[in-house]
């Protein structure tokens, strides 16, 4: 569903590549967690799949289509949750969800919108409040609801649990597991080793633009993963 | 999507304040227009009454001498103000809308008019065309300068791009909302103006509104192009405000300076001096010589006998006539140059949309320089007809009482110069399309970049 073939990105000719020869595949139902320090190339990878950046070489494929050559079509398969979800402060959480769902071509009823927000963990009394008064975690939950509304086959997550409290973070992990069970391919960039062990099917560790380790999550304990991570980075 | 994007736009406090201020400024401008039209109506009513009273009084006092009576009698020609001039006052406040002339030398009477309020002239009028030309673009800039760039800076654009693959559609809709809201204010003002100024709903009003709408669209296109350059919001704002300043203040000032330099009018003073000199010199000129010069101008009056007394009216009016004749060359040169200035400014203004819009609105409202020039020509014809009529009567010693004075009511000049709507609309339309095209090309490349 999601494939990187020798994917390379160099921002400037005299700068070292931010991503060098990345090869990875995320099949439907898999959750691929990318671990790595800041500047390791995780967000660059996500941005290349989103089409926000043009690769210097190599290919990013979604459902077999090159993101570069089929920019519009590949976005139809995608949902995205950034580290910090910044929405429209003049609209309520429900209106923001309605707006972004309608952008994706979904005309949802108020009950459906509320249901999505509840599924994302946003309390009912906050649905109609202006987003200007939301905490970062609450905005993040609206972002999750937006991603859910699109019913995308591929979910790209960039530090999605940043700002979520432990309970919400745990609910989010359960949500990802459900989506994965429904066949969604998920690529998640994160610093959270334990969360990635908990939800991931595969774990990739990146360093200086290289994917240096790819491990099946099921074969590791959280402590083993932490040890490998610390040795690798 | 449009409903929610509109909500998001309208709920912004700054937008609401801006729209309210624009609306208030617009309504004030309409009230100023109403005031202007009322003043004009009152002035016309007054001049009609005054002419009747003045005639009655002078005819009683100078009942024995037509020449003396005509020395005092003033005949008025009104340059009828169209209701549309309440929207675009143009030069109506600096040039007379009523010319009251005796049959004496015309050139010295042409500019014999009072200005209503010099303080207003200093500040300029807050008429509707001012609100349209100066304030509408400012609000449009304030609403559009950060379109897309602000969302890029805040991070929402990434989500927009991912949710809606056809981002151009989103951009068009965001623009349509902003432009639609601002055109809505324009529509509201026009809707208020129609009953308030008693505007007839006709092709002229349609052209006026069409040009106003295209002017707003032109600025929307400029904003569209600037925001397509993918600069930061602050840079967009700087570019747009600089553009506003350049197009609205700098370029028109440069054009004016060019016109004044290219077509200097020393004849303005020269005409006055020549007219006065031409007339005053004749007091010391041989009467017969004066009369011969007069007969050269009007051979039909050759039969009148030569002056026998130290003063006689045919000779006096011949002196007056020759004052005009002497100043004629300079006066014609002045009018030609002013007409040239007008023609060149109309042509060059096609590349300066605010100036073009102002000139076109003035032209449609009958408040432009073109109208004033045509009114001056009409005044010349009006004066000439009076002269020809009264010269004949005076030279034949027709008694005052045999003239049907009640025939001489205030006359009205109707400016029936054809309106070329296409000339008004086309430059704005073309420039709008150019900027939309340039913006479209840029956005096509950059819209999906986060």
Image: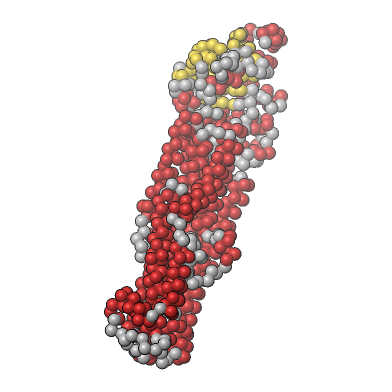
Can you see residue B406?
A: no
Residue at the (35%, 78%) spot, across then down: B289
Residue at the (51%, 58%) spot, across then down: B128
- Seen from the viewer's position, the closer of residues A181 and A74 is A74
Occupied quadrant, residue B99: bottom left
Residue B344: x percent and y percent? 41, 53
Residue at the (59%, 11%) spot, across then down: A210
Residue B26: x percent and y percent? 54, 57
- Seen from the viewer's position, the closer of residues B420 and B204 is B420
- Is the C terminus of chain A in the top left, top right, bottom left or bottom right quadrant? top right
Can you see residue B122?
A: yes
> Vertically, is A213 above or below B239?
above
> Vertically, is B268 above or below B68?
above
Occupied quadrant, residue A110: top right
Residue A152: x percent and y percent? 52, 25
Residue at the (60%, 40%) spot, across then down: A91
Residue B366: x percent and y percent? 43, 63
> Vertically, is B360 above or below A92?
below
**B213 to the left or right of A14:** left
**How is the rendered protein coloured?**
secondary structure
Q: How many marks?
A: 0
**B252 to the left or right of B375:** right
- Seen from the viewer's position, the closer of residues A123 and A34 is A34
């Amino acid at each position: 569903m999601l494939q990187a073939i020798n994917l390379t990105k160099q921002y400037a000719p005299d700068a070292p590549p931010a991503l060098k020869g990345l090869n990875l595949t995320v099949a439907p139902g898999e959750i691929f967690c990318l671990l790595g320090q800041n500047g390791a190339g995780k967000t660059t990878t996500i941005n290349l799949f989103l089409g926000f950046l043009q690769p210097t070489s190599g290919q990013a494929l979604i459902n077999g289509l090159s993101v570069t050559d089929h920019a519009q079509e590949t976005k139809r398969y995608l949902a995205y949750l950034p580290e910090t979800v910044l929405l429209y402060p003049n609209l309520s959480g429900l209106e923001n969800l309605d707006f972004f769902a309608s952008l994706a071509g979904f005309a949802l009823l108020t009950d459906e919108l509320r249901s999505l927000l509840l599924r994302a963990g946003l309390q009912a009394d906050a649905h109609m409040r202006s987003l200007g008064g939301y905490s970062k975690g609450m905005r993040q939950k609206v972002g999750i609801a937006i991603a859910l509304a699109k019913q995308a086959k591929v979910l790209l997550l960039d530090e999605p649990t940043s700002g979520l409290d432990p309970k919400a973070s745990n609910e989010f992990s359960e949500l990802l597991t459900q989506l994965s069970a429904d066949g969604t391919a998920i690529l998640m960039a994160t610093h959270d080793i334990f969360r990635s062990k908990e939800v991931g099917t595969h774990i990739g560790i990146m360093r200086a633009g290289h994917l240096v380790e790819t491990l099946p999550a099921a074969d590791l304990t959280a402590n083993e993963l932490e040890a490998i991570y610390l040795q690798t980075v | 999507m449009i409903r929610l994007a509109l909500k998001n736009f309208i709920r912004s406090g700054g937008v609401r304040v801006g729209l309210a201020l624009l609306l208030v400024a617009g309504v004030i401008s309409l009230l100023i227009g109403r005031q202007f039209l009322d003043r004009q109506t009152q002035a016309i009513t007054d001049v009609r009454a005054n002419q009747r009273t003045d005639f009655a009084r002078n005819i009683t006092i100078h009942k024995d001498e037509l020449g003396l009576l005509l020395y005092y009698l003033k005949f008025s020609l009104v340059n009828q103000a169209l209701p549309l001039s309440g929207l675009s006052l143009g030069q109506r406040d600096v040039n007379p809308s009523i010319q009251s002339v005796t049959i004496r030398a015309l050139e010295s009477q042409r500019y014999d008019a009072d200005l209503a309020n010099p303080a207003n002239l200093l500040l300029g009028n807050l008429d509707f065309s001012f609100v349209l030309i100066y304030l509408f673009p400012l609000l449009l800039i304030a609403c559009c300068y950060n379109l897309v760039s602000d969302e890029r800076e805040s991070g929402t654009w990434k989500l927009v791009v991912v949710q809606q693959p056809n981002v151009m559609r989103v951009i068009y809709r965001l623009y349509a909302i902003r432009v639609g809201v601002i055109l809505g204010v324009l529509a509201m003002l026009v809707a208020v103006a129609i009953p308030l100024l008693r505007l007839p709903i006709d092709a002229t009003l349609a052209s006026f509104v069409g040009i106003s709408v295209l002017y707003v669209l032109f600025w929307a296109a400029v904003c569209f192009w600037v925001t397509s350059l993918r600069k930061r919001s602050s840079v967009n704002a700087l570019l747009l405000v600089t553009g506003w300043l350049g197009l609205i203040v700098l370029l028109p000032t440069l054009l004016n300076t060019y016109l004044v330099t290219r077509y200097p009018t020393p004849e303005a003073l020269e005409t006055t001096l020549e007219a006065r000199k031409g007339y005053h010199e004749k007091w010391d000129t041989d009467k017969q010589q004066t009369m011969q010069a007069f007969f050269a101008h009007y051979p039909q009056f050759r039969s009148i006998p030569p002056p026998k007394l130290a003063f006689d009216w045919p000779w006096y009016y011949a002196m007056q006539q020759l004052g005009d004749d002497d100043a004629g060359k300079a006066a014609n040169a002045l009018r030609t140059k002013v007409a040239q200035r007008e023609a060149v400014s109309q042509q060059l203004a096609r590349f300066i949309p605010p100036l073009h819009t102002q000139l076109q609105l003035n032209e449609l409202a009958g408040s432009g320089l073109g109208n004033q020039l045509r009114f001056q020509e009409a005044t010349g014809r009006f004066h000439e007809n009076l002269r020809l009529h009264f010269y004949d009567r005076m030279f034949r010693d027709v008694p005052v009482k045999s003239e049907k004075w009640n025939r001489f009511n205030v006359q009205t000049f109707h400016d029936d110069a054809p309106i070329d709507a296409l000339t008004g609309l086309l430059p704005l339309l073309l420039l709008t399309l150019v900027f939309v095209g340039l913006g479209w090309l840029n956005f096509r490349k950059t819209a999906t970049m986060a």
